[in-house]
Amino acid sequence: MDFSWTPEQQALRARIIEFARRDLRDDVAERDKAGAFSRQLWRKCGEMGLLGLNAPATYGGAGADALTTALAIEALGYACADNGLTFAVSAQLTSLQPTLLDFASPTQQARFLPGLVKGEIIGCYAMSEEATGSDAYALRTTAEKREGGYVLNGEKWFVTFGPIADMAVIYATTNPKAGKWGVSLFIVESNAPGYSASPVQDKMGLRTVPIGKITLRDCFVPAENLIGREGAGASIFNASQEWERACILAGQIGMMERQLEACVAFARERQAFGQPIGKFQAISNRIAEMKLRLETARLLTYRAAWLKQSGQPAMLDAALANLHLGESFLQNSLDAVRIHGARGYLTEFEIERDLRDAMGGPIYGGTSDIQRNIIARLLGL
């Protein structure tokens, strides 16, 4: 493994940082307070090429590999103060688009990918259900075959972009007797009769990206909207989870680096008892631990992405990366608040927002406990 970056990759990183600092600046604190998503910033990400990073040139993308995609998301997390926007970009690049690129038909790709890449349409990836949670294959959403297509009934919960998406990829059971091998995947457009979405749900963190519920009531989906074949949903989901778990939290590496720089600067400047607080071991040790978590999380993420792009099994390494990165960002955010003291506790200094945003890391994309279960199972336990 060689994680040294080519001049082209370094230039991409620098370009994303410059773009984010120049074009993604607005009053994030106010939008966080209001729970408001910025379509304007989303379109800017599309215009810059971020949303099409891993899509082929045929659809307006750059055809980037997994490592380059992880590096780009990391750079965005470092330079963009809107953690919700970074997460939303990550979700498109690591959940929705890889599923379409790897499994959708050329007709389906041609219909939806150009608009997604440009930021002209918004898509979402809908697997989770309120009653099943981490028991991913115990789906209650059903798809009954009818002439010319399928009729879907059920609800999807905790869907990123669910309330505002123009299209969704939705997992539903076509054969309940077959268990997980009876799960299939469909493209459902938001204007389909019987499709409805809930208003944006309030949440603790990542408030600038909308999350909500999709309801399907006798929603007819034409047969050409089936992705792959009937019963292929489990295989598609497993493949997509390697992508998601390996890279979706890559933005948090950049966020942790930004945090660390802020904490070091504050520890040098803030005086207590006649000296900078960084001279106190309690502070310096905390910062050292933040650096350790950052670098180990970075290496685990890069290794998982490298395995993915090399065509090697990446499930174990993706679970390790997801587990460690999610929990490391949470702990580093807590340490950042403690280092900044009262400033860290007050909203106006924008330190506490990272802590609220970090709390989702051990939950979405498979909880930390689920990641531990996966790791143990893959080790033969």
Image: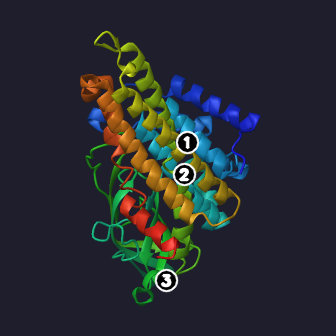
Badge 2 is on which residue?
247
| Mark 2 element type | helix
Is 234 situated above or below 69? below
Q: CA distance from mark 1 to mark 3?
A: 33 Å
Question: Is the residue marked by circle 3 packed among few (<14), some (14-19), or many (20+) residues within 10 Å?
Answer: some
| Mark 3 element type | helix
Give the amino acid at mark 1: Ile
Badge 1 is on which residue?
73
Determine whether label 1 and label 2 are within 8 Å by CB.
yes
**Left or right for 101, reference 338:** right
Residue 48 % position (x, y): 61, 34
User: Which sits earlier in the primary sequence, circle 1 or circle 3?
Assistant: 1
User: Which sits earlier in the primary sequence, circle 2 or circle 3?
Assistant: 3
Query: Which of labels 2 and 3 is toward the front?
Result: 2
Residue 298 % position (x, y): 55, 44
Q: CA distance from mark 1 to mark 2?
A: 8 Å
User: Which sits earlier in the primary sequence, circle 1 or circle 2?
Assistant: 1
Q: CA distance from mark 2 to mark 3?
A: 26 Å
Residue 345 % position (x, y): 25, 29
| Mark 1 element type | helix
Q: Is residue 25 visible?
A: no
Front-most of residues 55 and 313: 313
**Left or right for 118, reference 257:** right
**Mark number, residue 181:** 3
Q: Residue furthest front?
A: 281
Is 167 situated above or below 282? below
